[in-house]
Amino acid sequence: MQTWYGLSDYEVEGRLNDNISFSRFIGLSLDAKAPGHSVLSRFRTELTNKGVYEKLFKEVNKRLVKHKVNVKTGAITDASITPTPLKPKGIRPIKQKPTAQKGHATRSRQ
Protein backbone atom coordinates (compact mmCIF):
# COMPACT_ATOMS: atom_id res chain seq x y z
CA MET A 1 0.00 0.00 0.00
CA GLN A 2 2.92 2.28 0.72
CA THR A 3 4.27 1.77 -2.78
CA TRP A 4 0.88 1.98 -4.52
CA TYR A 5 -0.03 5.26 -2.84
CA GLY A 6 3.47 6.75 -2.53
CA LEU A 7 3.25 7.09 1.26
CA SER A 8 6.03 7.63 3.78
CA ASP A 9 6.40 5.35 6.80
CA TYR A 10 4.78 8.06 8.95
CA GLU A 11 1.84 8.31 6.53
CA VAL A 12 1.36 4.52 6.45
CA GLU A 13 1.25 4.43 10.25
CA GLY A 14 -1.36 7.19 10.27
CA ARG A 15 -3.48 5.60 7.54
CA LEU A 16 -3.45 2.23 9.29
CA ASN A 17 -4.70 3.88 12.49
CA ASP A 18 -7.33 6.05 10.74
CA ASN A 19 -8.53 4.15 7.70
CA ILE A 20 -10.55 0.95 8.09
CA SER A 21 -9.85 -0.26 4.55
CA PHE A 22 -6.09 0.03 5.11
CA SER A 23 -6.36 -1.83 8.42
CA ARG A 24 -8.53 -4.58 6.94
CA PHE A 25 -6.15 -5.03 4.01
CA ILE A 26 -3.30 -5.98 6.35
CA GLY A 27 -5.55 -7.95 8.72
CA LEU A 28 -5.39 -5.47 11.60
CA SER A 29 -8.37 -5.69 13.97
CA LEU A 30 -10.28 -2.54 14.88
CA ASP A 31 -8.98 -2.52 18.44
CA ALA A 32 -5.34 -3.13 17.48
CA LYS A 33 -2.83 -0.34 17.07
CA ALA A 34 -0.86 -0.19 13.83
CA PRO A 35 2.88 -0.79 13.89
CA GLY A 36 4.88 2.41 14.24
CA HIS A 37 6.78 4.02 11.38
CA SER A 38 10.14 2.78 12.74
CA VAL A 39 8.84 -0.82 12.85
CA LEU A 40 7.71 -0.51 9.23
CA SER A 41 11.09 0.87 8.21
CA ARG A 42 13.08 -1.83 10.04
CA PHE A 43 10.85 -4.58 8.63
CA ARG A 44 11.28 -3.33 5.06
CA THR A 45 15.05 -2.98 5.56
CA GLU A 46 15.25 -6.55 6.90
CA LEU A 47 13.26 -7.90 3.94
CA THR A 48 15.50 -5.97 1.53
CA ASN A 49 18.71 -7.18 3.20
CA LYS A 50 17.54 -10.79 2.92
CA GLY A 51 16.65 -10.26 -0.75
CA VAL A 52 12.98 -11.12 -0.36
CA TYR A 53 11.30 -7.70 -0.52
CA GLU A 54 10.83 -7.68 -4.32
CA LYS A 55 9.79 -11.35 -4.36
CA LEU A 56 7.18 -10.73 -1.68
CA PHE A 57 5.89 -7.63 -3.47
CA LYS A 58 5.55 -9.57 -6.74
CA GLU A 59 3.77 -12.43 -4.96
CA VAL A 60 1.25 -10.06 -3.37
CA ASN A 61 0.58 -8.47 -6.77
CA LYS A 62 0.20 -11.90 -8.39
CA ARG A 63 -2.39 -12.95 -5.78
CA LEU A 64 -4.30 -9.70 -6.22
CA VAL A 65 -4.47 -10.31 -9.98
CA LYS A 66 -5.61 -13.90 -9.34
CA HIS A 67 -8.51 -12.53 -7.28
CA LYS A 68 -9.26 -9.97 -10.01
CA VAL A 69 -8.12 -7.02 -7.91
CA ASN A 70 -6.59 -4.44 -10.20
CA VAL A 71 -4.16 -2.23 -8.29
CA LYS A 72 -2.59 0.81 -9.88
CA THR A 73 -0.57 3.62 -8.44
CA GLY A 74 -2.93 6.15 -6.93
CA ALA A 75 -3.20 9.21 -4.79
CA ILE A 76 -5.12 9.86 -1.63
CA THR A 77 -6.83 13.21 -1.51
CA ASP A 78 -8.16 14.92 1.55
CA ALA A 79 -11.32 16.68 0.48
CA SER A 80 -12.09 18.42 3.76
CA ILE A 81 -13.07 22.05 3.61
CA THR A 82 -11.28 24.31 6.04
CA PRO A 83 -11.93 28.00 6.68
CA THR A 84 -9.15 30.35 5.72
CA PRO A 85 -8.65 34.08 6.14
CA LEU A 86 -7.14 34.28 2.66
CA LYS A 87 -9.14 35.14 -0.42
CA PRO A 88 -8.42 33.63 -3.81
CA LYS A 89 -6.56 35.98 -6.13
CA GLY A 90 -8.67 37.76 -8.70
CA ILE A 91 -11.87 37.66 -6.68
CA ARG A 92 -13.04 40.96 -5.29
CA PRO A 93 -15.72 41.32 -2.65
CA ILE A 94 -19.04 42.60 -3.96
CA LYS A 95 -19.92 46.03 -2.66
CA GLN A 96 -23.63 46.36 -2.20
CA LYS A 97 -25.39 49.69 -2.26
CA PRO A 98 -27.67 50.33 0.68
CA THR A 99 -31.30 49.95 -0.30
CA ALA A 100 -34.40 51.23 1.42
CA GLN A 101 -36.33 48.44 3.02
CA LYS A 102 -40.06 48.54 3.39
CA GLY A 103 -41.03 50.41 6.52
CA HIS A 104 -37.57 51.94 7.08
CA ALA A 105 -36.64 55.50 6.29
CA THR A 106 -33.32 56.30 4.66
CA ARG A 107 -31.29 59.46 5.12
CA SER A 108 -29.32 61.00 2.34
CA ARG A 109 -25.85 62.24 3.19
CA GLN A 110 -24.95 65.81 2.31
Image (tube, grey):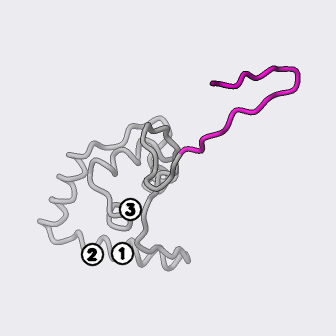
Helix, strand or loop at label 2? It is helix
Q: Amino acid at mark 3?
A: Met
* Residue for point 76% across, 23% down: 106
Q: Is residue 54 magenta?
A: no
Q: Which mark is residue 109?
A: none
Contact flag, marks 1 and 2 (Cβ < 8 Å): yes
**Rendering coords of residue 81 (x, y %):** 52, 44
State the residue position of label 3: 1
Disc 1 element: helix
Magenta highlight range = 93-110
Give the labeled residue for mark 1.
59
Q: Among all residues in the image, which is located at the extreme front?
A: 110
- Contact flag, marks 3 and 2 (Cβ < 8 Å): no
Disc 3 from disc 2: Cα separation: 16 Å
Q: Residue at x 21, y 70 (%)?
A: 52
Residue 55, disc: 2
Q: Looking at the image, which residue is at 46% across and 73% down? A: 71
